[in-house]
Image: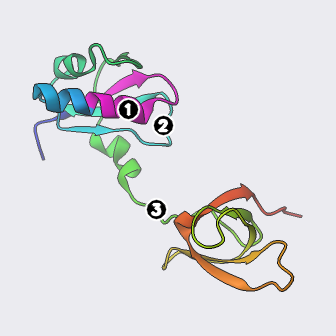
C-alpha cells in the first residue's frame, strides 16, 4: 500500500461528486501529491482524500467551490472500505415492489417486481397496465424503485 493517509473533506451536501471531480482536475493540472479521491453516494457532505499529508489535501482543495475544509485527524482505510464493495444493482428490490423501467424497449413503463435474481443481477417484472401480464426480465440498472411492497 502507498504511504498515503486518508483525510475527510467537508463539502456542500449534494455536491460531493462534483467537488471530487474538481479536486481531481486540480490535482492532475498541478501534479499535486493526491493518490485517491472517494465520494461515496451514501455519505452526504463528505468526501475522502488519500494523500501523504493534511497540507497536501488542504492545497488540493484550496479555491475549490463547495469544499469547506479538511477535518482534523485522519481515518483508517478499514473505516471506509465497505464503500468500495460493489453491490448488485438489484439489491434492495423485493417481489411486490413497484418500479419504473428507465431503459430498454419498455422505458417509462411502470411494473411490479415478480422475482429478483441477485446472481445474474436481473429482475423479472410484470408491466402494470398491460392486458395480459407477461413476465419481462430486465437488468438491475434498468429499473428505478417507485414504492416498496405494502407489508400486512
Q: Tell me if residue 128 comes above or below residue 24 in the rendering.
A: below
How far apart, in angstroms, are the residues tagged by discs 3 and 1?
Answer: 20 Å
| Left or right, residue 21 beside residue 124 | left
- Foreground pick, 112 / 91: 112
Task: Estimate how packed mark 3 is, as few (under 14), some (14 to 19) or many (20 or more) residues with alpha carbons within 10 Å.
Answer: few
**Magenta span of residues:** 7-23
Q: Considering the image in quadrants, where does the C terminus appear?
A: bottom right
**Residue 30 visible:** yes
Q: Is residue 110 above or below residue 28?
A: below
Dot placed on the residue nearer the N-terminal end, 3 or 1: 1
Q: In the rendered image, which residue does mark 3 sit on?
A: 87
SS state under label 2: loop
Q: Which mark is residue 43?
A: 2
Question: Where residue 96 appears, x then y in whole percent?
Answer: 77, 70
> Could you say which quadrant of the image residue 31 lies in?
top left
Q: Which residue is mark 1?
A: 47
Amino acid at each position: 500500500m502507498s504511504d498515503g493517509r486518508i483525510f475527510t473533506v467537508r463539502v456542500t451536501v449534494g455536491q460531493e461528486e462534483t467537488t471530487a471531480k474538481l479536486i481531481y482536475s486540480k490535482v492532475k493540472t498541478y501534479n499535486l501529491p493526491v493518490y485517491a479521491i472517494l465520494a461515496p453516494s451514501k455519505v452526504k457532505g463528505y468526501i475522502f482524500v488519500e494523500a501523504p499529508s493534511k497540507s497536501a489535501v488542504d492545497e488540493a482543495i484550496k479555491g475549490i467551490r463547495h469544499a469547506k475544509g479538511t477535518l482534523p485527524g485522519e481515518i483508517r482505510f478499514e473505516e471506509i472500505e465497505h464503500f468500495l464493495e460493489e453491490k448488485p444493482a438489484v439489491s434492495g428490490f423485493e417481489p411486490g415492489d413497484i418500479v419504473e423501467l428507465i431503459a430498454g424497449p419498455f422505458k417509462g413503463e411502470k411494473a411490479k417486481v415478480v422475482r429478483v435474481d441477485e446472481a445474474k443481477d436481473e429482475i423479472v417484472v410484470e408491466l402494470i397496465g398491460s392486458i395480459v401480464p407477461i413476465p419481462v426480465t430486465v437488468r438491475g440498472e434498468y429499473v428505478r424503485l417507485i414504492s416498496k411492497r405494502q407489508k400486512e
